[in-house]
Structure formats: structure tokens, C-alpha cells
């Protein structure tokens, strides 16, 4: 049962082969059985079973949406009314959200069952899920390896069949890189496609919520539920939402694929390069044309991103001051002591590093040299993509320069950790949509193919990913023991 897709499960529920309560109980049992993965921060057992019972009634009455009764889970960055929303931080360990994020509201309307809240890097800062206050998430393919970050809990839970699907958020790669490390499908939509209302902010001009699923077909269903204009989010895009499942089977004859040569340099692991090029060959068989493109500005993406993301995070996280909500230190002497100790005691090392870097980059003497420079670089990177999309329909590349690395391997060297995002970060700077699709294995660990599209081309990306998933079975592989 737990290997079925959303569409298959929706059919089983309607054919009364299984009830949503049974299905939900099955997932809750699996979550307990595999608690060692540490993919969940909170399991909402009672609530899940109550929602499932309601879903069964709705299904029996007919006219239920496709997701009704399907057990999914939410990254713990989305505010959930009455339920702890920690963002992976000690700062919010005591925070019960007083309202729902728009994304959560939309899932509630769809009748989906929420199993719980998923582990993540603290405030979504990280590439390995090792910065979470709740501990490292294990990768189901190799429990000594990281699950990737920051949506590592989401990726591990979907890969291990501890949820049918999950949400993630992606500021610089946090949907795509953990999806690649755990062998699942990840979709980071165009900036503005999915509302950020109630999604705890890290870097507001880059953050975007999206889908983490086992297939492109399932990702289409999730995006359909999540996407759309929201007047509560001033950066939400007022663009019509197409039917994302309608074009999944479209023929790819004549599709123009660009391979950015800067993403296939000598630095790339040769086995990963070979895996990606094999996937590209598959696309040629499906009728696509492939050409090399050059995007010289890509090499500046990491420094530009880490200045901009840190600057925005230093502003966003200033609200956590011990006075309003979240962690408060014991017996503060005065206001300054309250701020300093609350923040000092509740933020982890990586979050503090980013706040320091961001505050520095925004300070009077350095603003022009760092922040403005990074913004100009961001524009040049966007222009590179714009030019590329005049010539091709989609771009393809690896998601990550390596497969899932070992736990503890990069924690002492932040620069090494930042370099893990080398292929994903530029896409956020340009606000583009991109997917990670399972494309093979190196040393028994999954490799992800990145497919990048032009703004609002999610339907095309899903079509391109789906055709590949019909021709290959990488996305159907199940980690041993799950
Ligand atoms: N690893 C990147 C960072 O730490 C991206 C994280 C994300 O996308 N949320 O900022």
C-alpha cells in the first residue's frame, strides 16, 4: 500500500479497498517503526486519525478532491494552528502557532491528512539537516549519511514511505538537494508561485515552498493544491494556475535542452557527470535536442547568495528577541540582557554565523561593497538565464556535486558545506522553477538530475520529468528495509 502513488491511493480509497483511517494508521505505525531516522519533529497522531475519519465521510459522500484522505506531512517551517511550529530551532521549541500558513489552509481544504511536522535545518539554514535543534536526520539509503538540507526530514520521510508526500521550502536548494540525496522527486516552483504567508522567513526574496514526492505525477497534484495568488503575501504572483496534470504525457519531440558548460567542469565528480549525461541521452531517445550553453556569471552565485541570504536572515530573525514569543532566558537583568541572552542561548551556531555575516554586510561602511555588489551580481546571473532561455526550453545539470556525504563530514568547515549548493543556488537568485529527479546511483546512493525552467514553466518541467519517469524506474527504487 505504501508504494502506491497519490492517484493510485485515491482510487483505492474510492474503491473502498482501504479506508483513510486504515491508511493513516499504517503510516503512523511506520513512523514509529522507523523513528530512528529522526525525520519527524512532531507526530500529530490523534488529529491525523480524526481528519482521516472525516475524509472517509467526505469520500463516502462523493465529490471529494483527489488528496482527500491521503496522509502527507509538512515541513516544520509552515505555521500550523494549535500545533508546535519549531522551524528546527530551540528558539521556537515552545511556539504553538496561532494561525495556519496559506499552504496549510489549502491542504486542509483538499482533505489531505497531516501526519505531523518534519525535521529541518534550523531556520532552513544548512545543506545537511545537521543544524536542527532536534538532531540530524538519517538518510534511508545509508543511515550514516546525511539526508541533505534543509528539507531533510521531508526527503527522508518520503523516501522511507513515512508519508505519501511532503512539503519543503527552497531558498538555495533545500528542496532539490535533499530530494537528490534521498532519491525522490523535488519541485521548487517559480518565486511567488506558492504563498509564503505563514512560512517562517529565512531570506524573503529567495524562499519558496514546493513539493517533495516520489514522482512528477504526484508533484503535479501537490503543486496544484499549493499554487496560486494570495493577497496575504505581497510577493505572491497574480498569475493563473494551469492544470499541472493535464500535459504530463506531452511528446518531447523537438524539446531543446541546454547544458550549461559551467556546471560540467572538471570539479564535477566523474561518476555523477556520467549519470547525468546518461539521463540526457535518454532525453535524446525521447526526441529532444541537446546543446551546450555558456553562463559565465554562474561562478559568482555562491558568494552573491551567501551575502544576500545572510543579509535578509539578519533582518528577518531580529523579531526573535525573547520579548514577543519563542524562547526567553531566565531572570533577565534588563532589556539588553533579555535580548542578548535569549538570542545567545536559543540560536544555534550556523544561525548565529549567518546573522553576524548579514549584519556585517548591511552595516554602513560595507553595504555598498558587499550587499549592493551582491545584488548587481544577482542581476547578471538572471540575465545569463534569460539569454539561455532564448535558445533552449529547459536547462539540465546535476543537483549536487556529490551524493549524500557522511554525517559530520562537513560540519567543521562551513565553506565546504556552502559549496554543496553550487548547482542549485543560482536558480533561486533568478527566481526560476527547477526540479530534482532521480537519475541513477553512484556507490549505492541516489543521484539527482536537475531540470531548470523559465519563469512559471512548472507544467513544462513536470511534463519533462514525467516522460523520463515513464522511460526509467530510478524513482521507483525503495531503500532497503523500508
Ligand atoms: N543550503 C542553503 C543555505 O544554507 C540553502 C538552504 C535552503 O534552501 N533553505 O542557505
Image (cartoon, rainbow, N blue to C red):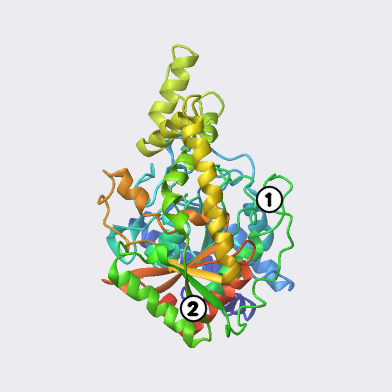
Q: Is mark 2 within 8 Å of ligand 1?
A: no
The structure residue drawn at horizontal position 67% and vertical position 57%, both measured from the top left corner, is: 106
**Residue mark closest to the camera, 1 vs 2:** 2
Element type at mark 1: loop
Relative to 145, does residue 87 appear above or below in the rendering? above
Residue 434 vs residue 347, the one in the foreground: 434
The image quarter containing residue 477 is bottom left
The answer to whether residue 43 is seen in the rendering is yes
Mark 1–mark 2 distance (CA, rounded to whole Å): 34 Å
Image coordinates of residue 255 in percent, x first then y, are 57, 79
Residue at image mark 1: 236
Tell me where residue 424 appears, x and y as whole percent: 45, 57
Q: Crowding at label 2, few (<14), some or many (≥20) Cα neighbours within 10 Å?
A: many
Residue matched to label 2: 290
Given residues 347 and 379, the one toward you in this image is 379
* Residue at image coords 57%, 71%: 391
Q: Residue 475 carries which label?
A: none
Q: Tell me if residue 168 comes above or below residue 393 in the rendering.
A: above
Amino acid at each position: 500500500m505504501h508504494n502506491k502513488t497519490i492517484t493510485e491511493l485515491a482510487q483505492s480509497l474510492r474503491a473502498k479497498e482501504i479506508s483513510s483511517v486504515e491508511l493513516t494508521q499504517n503510516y503512523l505505525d511506520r513512523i514509529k517503526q522507523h523513528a530512528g531516522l529522526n525525520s519527524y519533529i512532531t507526530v500529530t497522531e490523534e488529529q491525523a486519525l480524526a481528519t482521516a475519519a472525516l475524509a472517509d465521510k467526505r469520500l463516502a459522500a462523493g465529490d471529494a478532491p483527489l488528496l482527500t484522505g491521503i496522509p502527507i506531512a509538512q515541513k516544520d517551517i509552515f505555521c500550523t494552528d494549535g500545533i508546535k511550529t519549531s522551524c528546527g530551532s530551540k528558539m521556537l521549541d515552545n511556539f504553538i502557532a496561532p494561525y495556519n500558513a496559506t499552504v496549510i489552509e489549502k491542504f486542509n481544504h483538499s482533505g489531505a491528512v497531516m501526519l505531523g511536522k518534519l525535521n529541518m535545518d534550523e531556520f532552513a539554514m544548512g545543506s545537511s539537516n545537521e543544524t536542527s535543534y532536534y538532531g540530524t536526520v538519517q538518510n534511508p539509503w545509508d543511515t550514516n549519511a546525511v539526508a541533505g538540507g534543509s528539507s531533510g526530514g521531508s526527503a527522508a520521510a518520503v523516501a522511507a514511505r513515512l508519508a505519501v508526500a511532503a512539503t519543503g521550502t527552497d531558498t538555495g536548494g533545500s528542496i532539490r538537494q535533499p530530494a537528490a540525496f534521498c532519491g525522490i522527486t523535488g519541485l521548487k516552483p517559480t518565486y511567488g508561485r506558492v504563498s509564503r504567508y505563514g512560512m517562517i522567513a529565512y531570506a524573503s526574496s529567495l524562499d519558496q515552498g514546493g513539493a517533495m514526492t516520489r514522482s512528477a505525477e504526484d508533484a503535479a497534484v501537490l503543486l496544484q493544491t499549493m499554487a496560486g495568488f494570495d493577497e496575504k503575501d505581497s510577493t505572491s504572483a497574480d498569475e493563473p494556475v494551469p492544470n499541472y496534470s493535464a500535459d504530463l504525457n506531452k511528446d518531447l519531440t523537438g524539446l531543446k535542452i541546454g547544458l550549461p558548460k559551467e556546471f560540467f567542469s572538471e570539479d564535477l565528480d566523474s561518476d555523477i557527470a556520467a549519470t547525468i549525461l546518461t539521463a540526457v541521452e535518454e532525453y535524446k531517445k525521447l526526441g529532444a535536442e541537446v546543446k551546450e550553453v555558456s553562463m559565465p556569471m554562474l561562478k559568482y552565485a555562491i558568494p552573491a547568495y551567501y551575502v544576500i541570504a545572510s543579509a535578509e536572515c539578519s533582518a528577518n530573525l531580529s523579531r526573535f528577541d525573547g520579548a514577543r514569543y519563542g524562547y526567553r532566558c531566565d531572570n533577565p537583568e534588563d532589556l539588553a540582557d533579555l535580548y542578548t541572552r535569549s538570542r545567545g542561548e536559543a540560536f544555534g551556531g550556523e544561525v548565529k554565523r549567518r546573522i553576524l555575516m548579514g549584519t556585517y554586510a548591511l552595516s554602513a561602511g560595507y553595504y555598498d561593497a558587499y550587499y549592493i555588489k551582491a545584488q548587481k551580481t544577482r542581476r547578471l546571473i538572471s540575465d545569463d538565464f534569460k539569454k539561455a532561455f532564448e535558445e533552449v526550453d529547459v536547462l539540465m545539470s546535476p543537483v549536487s556535486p556529490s551524493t549524500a556525504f557522511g554525517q559530520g563530514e562537513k560540519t567543521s568547515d562551513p565553506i565546504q558545506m556552502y559549496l554543496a549548493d553550487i548547482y542549485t543556488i543560482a536558480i533561486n537568485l533568478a527566481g526560476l522553477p527547477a526540479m530534482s529527479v532521480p537519475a541513477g546511483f553512484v556507490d549505492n546512493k541516489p543521484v539527482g538530475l536537475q531540470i531548470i525552467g523559465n519563469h512559471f514553466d512548472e507544467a513544462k518541467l513536470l511534463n519533462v520529468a514525467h516522460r523520463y519517469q515513464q522511460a526509467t524506474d530510478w524513482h521507483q527504487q525503495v531503500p532497503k528495509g523500508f
